Amino acid sequence: MKMSKSMANILLLITSVFWGSGFVVTKIALDANVSAGFINFVRGFLFVVCVLLFFYKKICKMTFQDFKVGLIAGLLNFGGFITQTIGVIYTTPSNNAFISAVYVVIVPLMAWIIYRKVFQLKSLVSIVGCLLGMVIITGIWNEEININIGDVYTLICAFFYAGSIVYLGYSTRTADFSVVAFMLAAVQAVGGLLFFLFVEEGQLSNVSWSVAIVPLLYMGIICSFVGQTLQVLAQKHTSATSAGLIMMLESVFGSMFSITFGFEPFTVKLVVGGMLIMLSIILMEVELKPFLSRTRKQLSIKENV
């Protein structure tokens, strides 16, 4: 399937909206006493079912290469999900959001180290702008620096997410997106189930199912199946750095959804920080060479006159 970079980035923006809404429903599920492992198991299981319903013919034709690519992507993806979900339990929401966003710095560095992708100056400016926007949104500068186990889990999550974005951007371009999506789902389901059974000891007795069922369905179908399938499809047609910057917007959308559903108040810092992140992403996507070339020509003409 041929796709322009602009369309790919639009799909990633839609993915960010879905993932941003996931912060709220994950919080609801956790408050209903659903454990991190079980959340990931249900998300993965529903994801598997949906992928099979829509793409079962392609899944049946999976090659070993497709399996290998999907497995690696799935392990990286699950590592990010499980460590972030655990991090939410032990740290503050602002710490979790900001530290998770550090993957936007790690992505271009990984792409340069592993795939020798040139690191552009405007990428550095965009990354700094995005991180500054996250500092403003989270208000993390007002908090006492006190590293806890939740922050450590969240930092590990950032490395997993960065690895997942880079790998999906450069190693899955020859694989069928539906097969990769299936492997992401299968690894998340199996990994979540194993974590639930052996680490969390399979405790479900205190779960408020009437509260948890809708968030779990939403996370599995919308956030995982729709969101991650769009991500895998789109990342074959854009750069890893662009993908990382765009998907960083999930934190901004997460704050917007949180305000909408009454979990936190509206603040000026959300507007200022969000606008700064948006401008940084626009800078990343604008091609500056034609503009600079025209400017040089105009200056040259003036000098000659």
Image: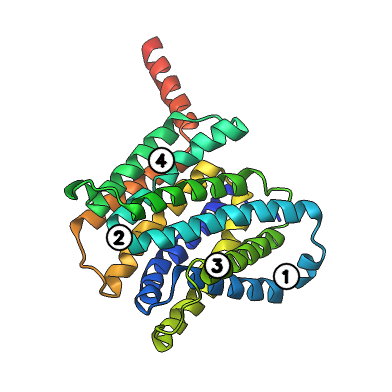
74 relative to 250 in the view: left or right: right
| Coloring applied to the structure | rainbow
| Residue 277 x/y as whole percent | 34, 48
- Residue of label 4: 283
Give the distance between the C-alpha atoms of the residues marked 1 and 2, in whole angstroms. 36 Å
- Residue of label 2: 93
Labels in figure, total: 4
| Residue 130 x/y as whole percent | 35, 44
- Residue of label 1: 55
Residue at 56% x, 50% y is: 164
Q: Which element is circle 1 on? A: helix
Which mark sits nearer the N-terminus, 4 or 1? 1
Which mark sits nearer the N-terminus, 4 or 3? 3
| Residue 79 x/y as whole percent | 53, 55
Which mark sits nearer the N-terminus, 2 or 4? 2
Whether the residues at callouts 1 and 2 have beta carbons within 8 Å, the answer is: no
Q: Which element is circle 3 on? A: helix
Residue at 35% x, 55% y is: 150
Whether the residues at callouts 4 and 1 have beta carbons within 8 Å, the answer is: no
Q: Of the numbered discs in the image, which one, if any, rests on residue 216?
A: none
Whether the residues at callouts 2 and 3 have beta carbons within 8 Å, the answer is: no
Whether the residues at callouts 4 and 3 have beta carbons within 8 Å, the answer is: no
Which mark sits nearer the N-terminus, 1 or 2? 1
- Residue of label 3: 192
Q: Is residue 280 placed above or below 272 in the rendered structure?
A: above
Which mark sits nearer the N-terminus, 1 or 3? 1
| Residue 170 x/y as whole percent | 64, 43
Q: Relative to the observer, which residue lies in front, 23 or 207? A: 207
Give the distance between the C-alpha atoms of the residues marked 2 and 3, in whole angstroms. 22 Å
Mark yes or no: residue 55 visible: yes
Give the distance between the C-alpha atoms of the residues marked 1 and 3, in whole angstroms. 23 Å
Mark closer to the observer (1, 2): 2
